[in-house]
Structures are given as structure tokens and as C-alpha cells.
Amino acid sequence: MAPGGFFGQALVVDVHAGHATGSRLTLDDQVLRAYLGGVGLGTWLMHRLAPPGVDPLAPQAPLAFVYSSLVGTPLTTSAKFAVVAKSPLTGLLTDALASSQFAISGKLTGHDAIVIRGRADELSVLLIDGDGPRLEPAPDFAGLSAADAETKAKERFGRGWRTAAIGPAGERGVRYATISHDGRHAGRGGLGAVLGAKNIKAVLVKAATKVGVADQAGVLAAAKDLRGRSFGPATAKYRELGTLANLLAFNAVSTLPTRNFTAATFAEAPRLAAEELHELRGVARNSCASCSIGCEHIYARKGGGSQRMEYENVFALGPLCGVSDPDDVFAASARCDELGIDTISAGGTIAWAMECVERGLIEEPWLRFGDGAALLRALDAIGSRAAGLGELLAEGSRRAAERVGHGSLDFAAQVKGLEMPGYEPRSLQSMALGLAVNARGADHNRSGAYEADLSGDVDRFHGGAAHVAAAVQTEDKAAVMDSMILCKFLRGVFDDPFTEWARLLALVTGWDLDADELRTAARRIVRAKRAFNLREGATAADDTLPVRMLETPIELGSGRTAALTADRLRSMVASYYEARGLDQDGRVSATDLADLFL
Amino acid sequence: MLSTLLSPVRGAEGRCRCTGYPRVVGKAAGVVLAGGRSTRMGTAKSELEWHGSTLLYRAAAVMARSVDGPVVVVAAPGQELPELPAGVEVVEDPVDGLGPMQGLAAGLAAVADRADVAFVCSTDLPFLHPAYVRRVLRALTDDIDVVLPVARGFRQPLAAAYQTRIAGLVAKLLAEGNQRPGMIFKHCDVTQLDDAALLADAAVAKYDPELDSVLNVNTPEDYRAARDREPPEVVVERFGALAKGGGHRPKVVRAATIGQAAEVVGLTLDRHVVAALNGDQVTKDGRLPLVAGDAVAFLSADAGG
Ligand code: SF4
């Protein structure tokens, strides 16, 4: 019998021509307990099901929707699902989380994960319920945004279905296309392109069964307690202003990447600040299903309509591109949503192109820092893969820089091919390490090491041993939260996280696990991701930052400069390897490989 | 050899957007002399209370934010020091009773392998301003050994900048029985900065127009007068959840420490609230001193995500 909260099986869907067949993959207790679910279990599935060296856009490449034991329980923020695949942007493992009813209904099809392989011969939608998978042709869905595809799916198939869909960019293989459900995006790494390469516009799931937990009364009591704590000071920022509250604060501490990481402050940041926009434009607050925090802040757009704004899309489409008009940034965010592309990678790639134009490396004189209309034009070119600039930028900044040459890779702000999020690594040196070593590439969700830099407990301008410890710790915490799954915006409410998480998991699953076992699971998940990447050809040389970050100091508001040298980063990476039990080339030992239950 | 510099130092210096301070160029250390007999004060100056911490805490913290190298406090043999800001080092004078020359020798020697130059000050300068420190340091070019301010009518060897390469010379002079810093100047290339030269710096002129940086306290009366002064004017900004009702807009308050500034705007530094001074290090230390012209940002400790 499967542990509480689990079905003990994954559904593997093979799509051939015009139909889909399903087979069951047993997930035994050992694997579930070792990987917890979500991102962890998704990583294990990729080890098992992705052929070594597979092209991420090939039919054989699997894409997994993965749930967890907590999904569907009343525990706040637990209605989430992970999407895991080999990334067309990085060629390595990528995983992204999204929320809401697709998580609950997907799990209640009776599976802890749904894995999709193959390719339909025409644009189709894939439906999965208690009777298994079926493929329906959907040529009329072509070119629709994910939101419109969701609406159309509801019209055609009825209201009981929950839909995760791609936009036109996913259909056209933009390497940073997203998969979306209910306005929330599995955003990073190009998962939408993977689904698009299978000719699948949308996946529809319908709940067909139920799943029990080990201790129903205990889970209810824990849910009540957690909900109460979720209203406290640790989540106030998310409730009151959302993540956009970071913008002015990051500007004040010189860590707001601006104009393709050539500055860490943006003089016009106040125009884009949550504090200002909230007064002038804030219209609503929203939340994912089963969430008592509600971090989504929705702003009115000039001329009608509204747009959900978060720090990362505002940073990437605002300061990073030198754009300061909120309406331009709102419009660019909306355009990314319509096209179905990751805002961070889109902003990062366009900012790189703007600098190339400045340097005379790309001949598109209209593409200038600070020009909102140019930003929108570039997004459209990417979404349609327009010949020339669109084709180039749809490949992401690393591939584009490799084509343009002339040293432009040095200032392409990416790690392993994934564009950098809104955290300046030279003035956040724990985060610098987190960005460099993370399996997904430059990533702020799998490494929250900026927490240490902004805590006042470490010297954020001089990375060393304390920064390495912080990077390891936050990576471990993220590995558990993304696997069990709870929203990371809840992280501040836990005083003794591993102990408290172990207790929650014990109530749901019936496992007698403790904090130490959970720490071991965290380390295993991080190692499993690395092992997958090594299998796919990654080396220690990939655990670095762009040359710009290592050779050009950044000016701080205080008038001092912050510098991160290649030597310092190398030494932090070496200490990280040691702390993770890796060899000096970042490889996983044979003993640790055996512990991955592959 | 003495030369007096009456005009602004050469070179176009970049300036910080928020404070207008000139950028510090090169690696500079800070040395605070904490020994000394404090005879007229009647109690150790380093232990004198200063807005919730001590005079020494203030001096070391001002030094730490003014230089980009190590900060060292030089104590007398066996002297017990009050708590110091994080990261500040302590060295002991090897011999007691040899005065500031001994402290200077020990301090310069302690930082010589990590910094080319050092700003050296005594503990008893309650209004020392980073703009002054930077102004003096900027005048210390390679061909000069010491920048000696002559401010408010007096030479200020204990608010001056030294090349760390002269550590050996100072030790030699001391060994020869010379205990007065004046002896150093006979053997070195020295540039003097008079009031006008100091005030030619825009930040000094704006934030320390009376050159209070060199005002020292020697008696209980001096101390009381200094302690009773109104705290400096600083700009406070609050962000995110800390800025309800337009609180993020800059607000001018009077506060001698970060903790006082927090209090004025109804905040307490704790697990959830941190501060950053002029966009620099993030801190939870409410005792860190503020000076005129500072900008303090308060933000949620869980910023990010
Ligand atoms: S905190 Fe925000 S992202 Fe997290 S579950 Fe709630 S609404 Fe969704």
C-alpha cells in the first residue's frame, strides 16, 4: 500500500501520431521517501526515463508533471505541481513550480506524476482522467495564448477539466517558453517548448478519485496552526505588496541589476515601485488555490485591463532593459504572458541585445535601452520567431551570444544558459555562489542564498566560508520545500524548518521520519540533479558566472565598489563541492550515486 | 619636509549619488588608538557611553565604513575593551606608557601587509565624519608619507593619514626614545591640509562645515557638552511592508545611531527588520553610528523571493 497522500504510481503517457497510450510506473515507498515528490521525484523520473544525451525537443524526451503527498491537503500553499524535463535552454535538468487546481485535479487522476513522451502528428490536447489518457486534435488552438487555450478547452471539454497550456511561443519552440495554468507559469528553462515540440498545446486533467492521509485529525490541526502563522510578520511583505516590494529595497542596497548588469541601482526605480504603484494602481489581490497568504497583486493598466506584477518581471522588463514607464513594463509583462515566455529570460536576452546594439554588434538601431516600444517590438519578434532578430533572441542569450561572437558572451547575463534573475551577484556574494552552482542555472528559487546576504549576518561584498554554508543551507531548504511541496513564501514562518516539515510529512504519509532524514533527502535531491547534469555532459566549468561579474566591479550607492573575482568564486565553489561531498571536479562519489536509488 | 596643500586635491573623483561622498581609491586601513591615560577625564575614554554604545564603538564603526581595508583597535597592554563592531580587530601595544607613538607603531605594523595606507585616529573624536576621513586619505599619494591636517588651529596627528610603509620608521624612532609624533614629520614627506583645503571637499563642507571631526573630549565637561549635542540629520527610508501609508518616501530625522533612527520611525531592528546605510552593508546592529548626510534604508530581512 502506498504511503498516505500518495498513489504509489506515475502515469507514463506515450503519444504517437494521433493517439496516446498510458502505462503505470510503480513508485515504491523507498523512492517516494527518498525524493518526497515534486521536484525531487521529478529528478528521479528524469534519471529513469530520459535517454542519456536526448535532445530536449526530441519526441523521446520526457516531460513530467509531478505532485506530492501534501497536494490536496488543507495545508496552506500546498496546491502546487512541479514540471520537470531536460531544458532546451540549458541542455540540463530544469524544473519549475506552478500552482492551483491543476495540481489537485492532476494528482486525483490517481497518479503522483504524469510523464509525457512522443509527438502528436498535429497540434493536439491531451486529456487525462481516471480512464487514462486520450489525445484530441486541436488545430484550432494554434496561436492562442495559454489563457485563451484554457478558456477554449473549458468550452469544448466542459468545466470539470483543469488545463495547463502553452502560448504561441511554445508552439514555435522559443527556448524559454512557459507552461501556464490559471495565470500561473511554470516559467523557467523552456518547458513550454518541450511540450510544444510534442505538438501538445494543452494538458487537461480531471479528478477521478481520492487519496487519504495517515492522520486526518493531525493534518487538520497542523493546517489550522500553519494558516494562523501564515498571517504573521514573516509573510507580511508578500501579503501587503507582493514580491514587487523588493524593487525599491534592492535599489537602496545596490543590488537591482540595471541595463544588462552594468549598474546595481536604477535612478527611476521609484516609478516602478510597489509602494508607489499600490497607491496609484493597485486594484486587487489574489492567491493560488489553498493559500492563505495571497501574494499576487494585480494592477490596473492605463487604457483598461489589469496585470499581475511581481518583482522578477518588473526587474527584467524594467531596469534590466532601462525601461522606467510602468505602462511599458505592464504591457511587456502582459505580452510575455500572451506569448507564453519567461519574463526573466526574455528581459535578460533583450537587455543583452540592447547592449550589443550599443556596441555595434547587432544592427537593429531601434533596439535601445530605455525604449518601451522597442521592448515590445523585440518581444513580438521573439514570440513569432521573426527572421533575423526574432530567431536569434528566441534561442536565449547564450546561444545568441555564441552566434554574434565578438566577446558578447562575456556580458550575456546567464549561467548554464539560463538568464540571471534580479539579484546582483557582486553585491550579494552568497547568492553569487548559489547562482553559479545551481543545477537549473542562474536561479533564485532553487538557491535562496540572498537571504544570508540581506540578513546582516555576513559581509555581502566578500564571499567566504559563511557564504558557502548559507548557499548550501538555502539550497537544501529549497530542495525540500519544492519536493514536499510548500510555497517558499511560507519559509519564514518555520522556526525549526526541517523538524517542522518532517512532522507535517509524518502526519500526511505515516512515515516516522525526522529532521535528519529530511536533511539527507535534501542533499540527495541536490546531488541527483547534479548527477543528471553530469550525465548530460555538464562539468565544473559550468559552475561559474559570466565574465562581466568576475572582472568588472559594480558601483554601490555608498560610492564604494563591490568586486567578485574569478579566484574568489572558484574558491567558494571548491568549498561548496567539499561541503556537498563532491570531488574537486564537482562529481558525485560512487557511494552517493548508490544512494540515489536509480 | 612639510608642504601645505591649499587647493582641492588633484584628479576628477567620482561621487556617490546619495551622499556626494568621494569614492575611496585604493586599499586603506583604519587604526583607532584606544590606550592613553585619560587623566583629565578620570575614566577611560574608550568606555564613555555614546548613544547606547561607547565612544570607542563609534570610532571603530566610523572607521569601518570609511575605509575598504581592515580596521584595528590598538589597546594598552592588558586593557579591557568594551564591545566592538563585528569584524574589528584588536592588537595590544607591546609596552605600556609610551603614548600615541607606540600605538601608531603597533597599529601601522598590524595592517602593513594588508593595506598601503591607514587613517589613524584616537578614540575621543565623537564627531569624526567619514567625509573627513576620506578627504584626508585622498590626499595621500604615493610620494607622500603622511597627510597631516592642521584643523581648527592645531596639528591633528591623531586624525591623519599615514603610509603603512613607515611602520618601521616609527618603531625605530620609538626605540631611539622619541615618543612624540612630531618626530615622525621630521623624517617623512608630509602634506599638511589646512581648514580651507579640508573644506574644499564638497562633502566635508556640507556635512562637517565646522570641522568637528577633530573636536576631541578631554574633560567630563567636554564629554557632557558633546553628549548633549543634537544628533545629526539623516534621511530614513522604509521599504515593503515597513512602509505603510507612504512611509517609503524619504524622511529627515535626527538620530545618532541606526537604532535611534529606527525608533523615530516606529521600527525595531530584529529578525524581520534590517538596515542598510547609504546602500552599503546590511546590518541588524542598532548601535552603528550615524553622521550628517547619512541615508538609512530599513527593509524586511526576508527581502527577495
Ligand atoms: S504565497 Fe503566492 S505564490 Fe505562494 S501559494 Fe500563495 S499566492 Fe501562490
Image (cartoon, rainbow, N blue to C red):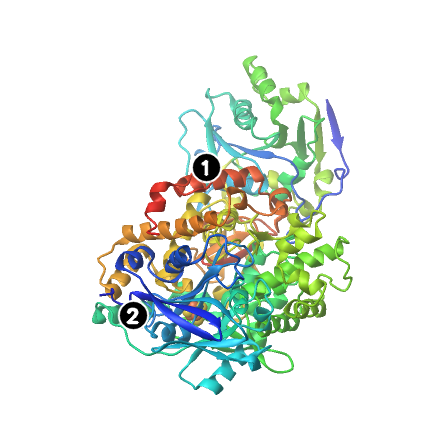
**Which residue position holds label 1?**
A584
Amino acid type, mark 2? Ala
Tell me if label 1 and label 2 are in contact, CB under 8 Å. no
Q: Quadrant of ligand 1?
A: bottom left
Res. A492 visible in picture: no
Q: Can you name the residue that lies furthest to the top here?
A: B176
Residue B134, percent from left and from top: 64, 40
Viewer-proximal residue, A243 or B236?
A243
> Would you call the spot at circle 2 few (<14 residues within 10 Å), some (14-19), or many (20 or more)?
some
Letter of the chain that mark 1 sits on in the rendering: A
> Would you call the spot at circle 1 few (<14 residues within 10 Å), some (14-19), or many (20 or more)?
some
In the drawing, does residue B82 fall left or right of residue B291? left
Residue B297, percent from left and from top: 54, 57
**Which residue position holds label 2?**
A223
Image-quadrant location for residue A81: bottom left
Viewer-proximal residue, A290 or A234?
A290
Image-quadrant location for residue A340: bottom right
